Amino acid sequence: MIYFDNTATSFPKPPCVLEAMAKFMNEIGANPGRSGHRLAIESGRIVYSAREALAELFHITDPPRIVFTANVTEALNLALNGLVKPGDHVITSSLEHNSMMRPLRCLEQQGIELTVVQCSPQGRLDPSNIESAIRPNTVMVALNHASNVIGTILPIAAVGQIARQHDLLLLVDAAQTAGVLSIDMERDGIDLLGFTGHKSLYGPMGTGGLIIGERVDIEKFEPIKCGGTGSRSEQEQQPEFLPDKFESGTPNAVGLAGLNASVRWILEQGLDQIRSHEIRLTKRLLDGLSSIPGVTIYGEQDPEKQIATVSFNILGKQPSEIGLRLDEEFGILCRVGLHCSPASHKTIGTFSTGTVRFGLGFFNTEDEVDIAIAAVRKIAEEGR
Amino acid sequence: MTPSQYAVILVDSTSHAMRIERLLTQHQIECKLIPVPRQLSSDCGVCVRFLQSEREKVVQRLNDTGIEVQGIFDI
């Protein structure tokens, strides 16, 4: 079996992740931040350790600025619903996942203005198009760091500069890039960074977060849920400080134990090593697929300009049919269709049938890439 | 209650307590996270306990890193 669906969720996970989670369930188990007994403190320490590891990864100095959420969708919903008010204008791109687009469309119904800046069919975003979309009431630019459909990396740092010049907040969806590309909130001008634990951070599902930069006014940032935090228990009002203001309810501590282990594993490997392995695999895959007659590849087709996600189609075949054959006949697991991103497929011209997507990860090998190329060649040749 | 040799740092959240614990430990200042003593607050969280004799060093470290605390109290 060859797992090429790492863009949806990475699999397998590093063994240290499973060990950390088993240790938590077997030996710790208590509620972090509630109670003061030794197990509760140990549980809290693990959650805090995950904050510290992520702070190191994203180069931030203040770990409590990391608010844990269930996934990146919840993080983006928090940032958008908590900060954007009716009458405000938000700029986004035509390469967004529905995790960004749907909350924005929902807010549009409630009276915000939205501009979706068109990207090129390769997924290229021209930062000057962001600048020319700015209006007097623009408050935020909300962008994907890399496309989950074609892998194209967006020019976040250039947009960050523009956002700072115009005093706008920059919200970045790092679902596909956290743990692969270097992200430095200060250097890249990012004010709000949403991440998910279960993709390129190699942690478990049910973990993620929003990192809140220093330019964000916490007082004006509304939580999307209120409740118990283990702090200020004498008050019936939500506390105002980070991360508690946005972290009500018992967190996924066992998941965060796994995420703590996975982020430390990434720091140990080094982003450079992870990225260069993925570049090597992506290049091999792109070279192989592009040599097959009838195969169309979408996006930049340049391993340096994209993450290890490659979308393609075979002339005369439906993506759904290709996906089923890859699974049943070749044991290759991938994702076909629209990948929760109708906007991206409209941008690249593959709406409404979609594409076949290979999402490679750190645990994939060159041999697996070669087997997959041969499988696609066989399917493509049959139809000719 | 008999006076002890300890003082505690009250903070906003467990995250802050963890952060201070890490900071003090790094600087070889002995400390321990304990439940907030009832006489100080009705909070159900934790605070950082240290030896009163280390108070000056503790305050210095907190000031250096700019971590906000609710207060330091002898217990």
Image (tube, coloured by chain):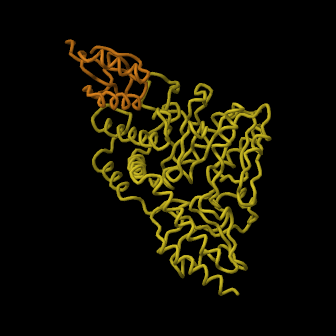
Left or right, residue A301 beside residue A330:
right
Any part of residue A316 in sight: yes
Q: Would you place residue B49 above or below residue A285 in this image?
A: above
> Count the marks: how many?
0
Q: Residue at x 57, y 71 (%)?
A: A285
> What x and y, as percent, mark residue A244?
48, 31
The location of residue A198, given as percent across then percent down, is 49, 54
Considering depth in this image, is A269 or A51 the residue closer to the camera? Answer: A269
The structure residue drawn at horizontal position 70% and vertical position 79%, both measured from the top left corner, is A294
From the viewer's perspective, tell me whether residue A296 is left or right of residue A195: right
Shade representing chain B: orange
Residue A60 at x, y percent in the picture: 49, 36
Residue nearest the viewer, comparing B24 with A181: A181
Q: Quadrant of residue B21?
A: top left
Residue A30 drawn above or below residue B64: below
Residue A319 position in % (x across, y down): 66, 73
Drawing shade for chain A: yellow
- The reply to whether residue B33 is in sight is no
Q: Quadrant of the C terminus of chain A?
A: bottom right
What residue lies at 76% left-to-right and 40% top-to-bottom? A131
Whether residue A367 sits left or right of residue B48 in the image: it is right
Q: Residue at x 70, y 72 (%)?
A: A296
Would residue B18 appear left or right of A63 to someone viewing this image?
left
> Which quarter of the figure has residue A108?
top right
